[in-house]
């Protein structure tokens, strides 16, 4: 049962990720990206990272994907021909991509991975919160500053100057 | 399901698909989607090493920072793309080759 669910999640993730990069319609790509992100959240749950799965759904699907769909809608004209949605140099891209994929897979195969056995944690959010507030406090504050800067910058850039 | 390599393979395939999108797409937003796929594949690696490599929760915290960075990046990139569209009437990134109009 677990294996069936795992295989299904992998199939959804990779199949819709393929749809994201080859689909002719940009909006279909965005919908396929929704399923990819959900599949990745499922993978997180299989890796005992349930808090990360929640963050994935809230931030990626609720935030970034909605932003992307807004971007698609705002940069489309009904009258315009959709030439810019097509792909370019598919052959070269496929060769480069398959080369990178072959290199990565041979690297994964040839490395002897150290795999420690661990027990399933009873809670994750508590430990992550402790780490954020103690060991990773400076990166946490810098990240908040980065978000503030990005928000102000995005508002500045997209403001209509006329 | 219970070994590290499975997740590394999934993440390698996701990375290659994202790279293919970044290389071949002409629309700026589609390129951004490829970048999101690449960031997600990196996140899968972080969480997988946190689960199997004995990093415990540090790997998950690092993946959290990657998600924060991805959110900031998406906001700024979309603002730039919409600006390019307002000025050039296209989102084709091959047409946006000048820094100043």
Image (cartoon, coloured by chain):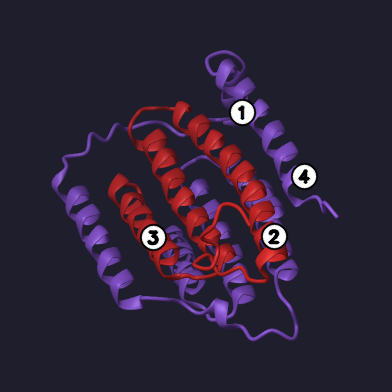
**Rendered image: mark on residue A90:** none
Task: Name the N-terminal-most of marks 1 and 4.
Answer: 1
Relative to residue A29, is residue B6 depicted above or below?
Answer: above
The residue that mark 3 highlights is: B19
Residue highlighted by disc 1: A143
The residue that disc 4 covers is A155
Q: Horizontal placement of B28 versus A88: left or right?
A: right
Q: Which residue is mark 2?
A: B82
For label 1, the SS is helix
Chain B visual colour: red
SS state under label 3: helix
Q: Nearer the viewer, mark 2 or mark 1?
A: 2
Find the distance from the CA under tag 2 to the CA under tag 1. Answer: 25 Å
The extreme front residue here reads B101
Local packing at callout 1 (Cα closer than 10 Å; few below 14, some 14-19, many 20+) is some
Mark 3 → mark 1, Cα distance in angstroms: 26 Å
Which chain is indicated by disc 4?
A
**For chain A, what colour was chosen?**
purple
């Amino acid at each position: 049962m677990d294996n069936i669910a795992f295989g299904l999640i992998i199939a959804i993730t990779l199949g819709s990720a393929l749809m994201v990069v080859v689909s002719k319609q940009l909006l279909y790509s965005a919908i396929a990206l929704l399923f990819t992100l959900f599949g990745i959240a499922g993978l997180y749950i299989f890796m005992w990272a349930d808090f990360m799965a929640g963050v994935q759904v809230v931030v990626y699907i609720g935030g970034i994907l909605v932003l992307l769909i807004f971007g698609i809608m705002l940069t489309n004209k009904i009258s315009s021909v959709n030439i810019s949605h097509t792909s370019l140099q598919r052959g070269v891209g496929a060769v480069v991509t398959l080369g990178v994929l072959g290199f990565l897979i041979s690297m994964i195969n040839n490395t002897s991975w150290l795999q420690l056995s661990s027990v399933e944690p009873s809670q994750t959010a508590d430990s992550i919160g402790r780490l954020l507030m103690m060991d990773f406090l400076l990166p946490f504050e810098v990240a908040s500053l980065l978000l503030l800067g990005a928000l102000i910058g995005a508002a500045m850039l997209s403001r209509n100057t006329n | 399901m219970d070994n590290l390599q499975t997740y590394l393979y999934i993440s390698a395939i996701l990375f290659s698909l994202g790279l293919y999108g970044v290389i071949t797409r002409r629309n700026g937003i589609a390129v951004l989607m490829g970048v999101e796929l690449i960031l997600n594949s990196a996140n899968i690696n972080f969480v997988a090493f946190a689960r199997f490599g004995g990093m415990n929760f540090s790997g998950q915290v690092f993946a959290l920072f990657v998600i924060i960075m991805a959110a900031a990046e998406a906001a700024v990139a979309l603002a730039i793309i919409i600006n390019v569209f307002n000025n050039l009437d296209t989102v084709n990134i091959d047409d946006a080759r000048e820094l100043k109009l």
